[in-house]
Image (tube, grey):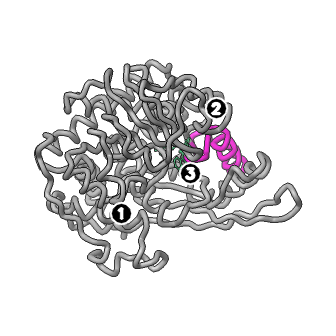
Amino acid sequence: MSKTSKPPVTAPSIASVSHSLIPSYLKADDLGPWGNYLQQVDRVVPYLGNLARWTETLKRPKRILIVDVPIHMDDGTVAHFEGYRVQHNVSRGPGKGGVRFHQDVTLSEVMALSAWMSIKNAAVNVPYGGAKGGIRVDPKKLSNGELERMTRRYTSEIGIIIGPNKDIPAPDVNTNEQIMAWMMDTYSMNTGSTATGVVTGKPVDLGGSLGRREATGRGVFTVGAEAARHLALDISTARVAVQGFGNVGGVAGKLFAEAGARVVAVQDHGGTIYREAGLDVPSLLKHVAETGSVAGFAQAESIANELFWEVDCEILIPAALEQQITAANAGRIKARMIIEGANGPTTPEADDILHERNVLVVPDVIANAGGVTVSYFEWVQDFSSFFWDEEEINARLVKIMKEAFSGIWQVAQDNKVSLRTATFIVACKRILHTRELRGLYP
Ligand code: NAD
């Protein structure tokens, strides 16, 4: 996409979504992240040709499971948590998507995240549908034993709809390899077999894949570098700001720094740090591993959280939570390019503002697809019980990400649309084509 091409902005308001598409279980006047997703779909309908008649498929999750997760707390009381697993679409293969433990998890959020997984999996052409899960809980307030009991009970509750050929969970915010190991064990105990392929993102010693932990950040870096090339932006001299320094942001920041970029600002839940000359990323990663946050890192100054969005930089990587770049801060962003490591960090209104200001947005649905791509490799390795070395995994990852990005870039050019709309065009066509091939049962 050339920097001057302006896509037609055809954002319908949520009110224009027909009433029948507003689920009775969400607030009609505030659909949350699900409303953002519906608007993104509406933008691609004009580009879907005959397949557009199947669009409503994309606007309705196939299956939603809400579960009560009761556990014994260490103090002898019983606590109940609300858990979800949403399978948005399984036309192209089993459901696939992470599990999030966070106090702000809502059904709308899990629905949107499951739909973005359908789009993402189709965008990189891995044979999966889209799914997502979550528990509304602040896991930092649980002991290790409570966390394990909650994970196991949740897995058992959603066990009726997950499985290596049905729906394969993975880590997301506040879930990790250990949690995947407990999920795999619980499912295996319930089914009487060792089912390594039921989750991905497992420890390597339990059927996990080499390179999985770094895969999302590596993918962010790979497509970011490709996008920078199209903008003639030299990443070896670029300044980078990263929001969220966990699995995704930490690895992406490290790879950009290794490529010569200066990581000048980092924000996480604990605060925002800044260093014009560039932060020492390996030391910062060590500090985060030891203290849990970037806050208090000695070799940087602490700045107000709100100032993060106006930091002088060429590349901005939101890699924390959704709805961070909004109409309120999009106008202040100085970066030339935003690479969405997080899912759904930019609202549709902010997308339009950034587009008007010629800021290139590399959307989540392609930018952070590296994780699910290596999850796919992990699942394939588990089925064949034959494991590849890291060099092969990284090479295959980079090849898939570059090819997918290049196709999407071309669609953006051809149709004069944003990269987000282009990714949705590619993905929605793939999903709806399989929908058409399979036909409607009965
Ligand atoms: P993580 O738990 O490892 O890290 C999350 C980071 O966000 C932490 O640094 C945390 O401090 C920060 N954060 C939390 N709340 C914040 C706030 N209010 N303000 C600023 N920072 C805040 O999670 P992750 O796996 O790195 O996931 C980050 C994002 O990337 C999520 O949107 C997730 O859905 C997405 N994602 C993750 C993967 C994956 O493989 N892990 C794959 C695709 C997309």
Magenta segment boundaries in residue numbering? 173-199
Real-space Cα distance between discs 3 and 1? 20 Å
Q: Secondary structure at mark 3?
A: strand
Real-space Cα distance between discs 1 and 2? 34 Å
Q: Amino acid at mark 2?
A: Ala
Pinpoint residue 182: horizontal percent, then vertical percent.
Answer: 69, 44
Does the residue tagged 3 have its C-beta within 8 Å of any atom of ligand 1? no
Residue appearing at x 35%, y 27% in the figure: 398
Pinpoint residue 100: horizontal percent, then vertical percent.
Answer: 57, 52
Q: Which residue is labeled 3 in the image?
A: 99
Q: Quadrant of residue 104?
A: bottom right
Question: Which of the marked residues, 3 or 2, is nearer the chain's N terminus?
Answer: 3
Determine if residue 434 is in view: no
Question: Which of the marked residues, 1 or 2, is nearer the chain's N terminus?
Answer: 1
- Neighbours of disc 2 within 10 Å: few (<14), some (14-19), many (20+): few
Label drawn at residue 36: 1
Is residue 412 placed above or below 21 in the rendered structure? above
Q: Secondary structure at mark 2?
A: helix
Q: How many marks?
A: 3
Circles 3 and 1: CB atoms closer than 8 Å = no
Q: Which residue is labeled 2 in the image?
A: 289
Q: Give the mark toward the camera: 3 or 2.
A: 2
Question: Which of the marked residues, 3 or 1, is nearer the chain's N terminus?
Answer: 1
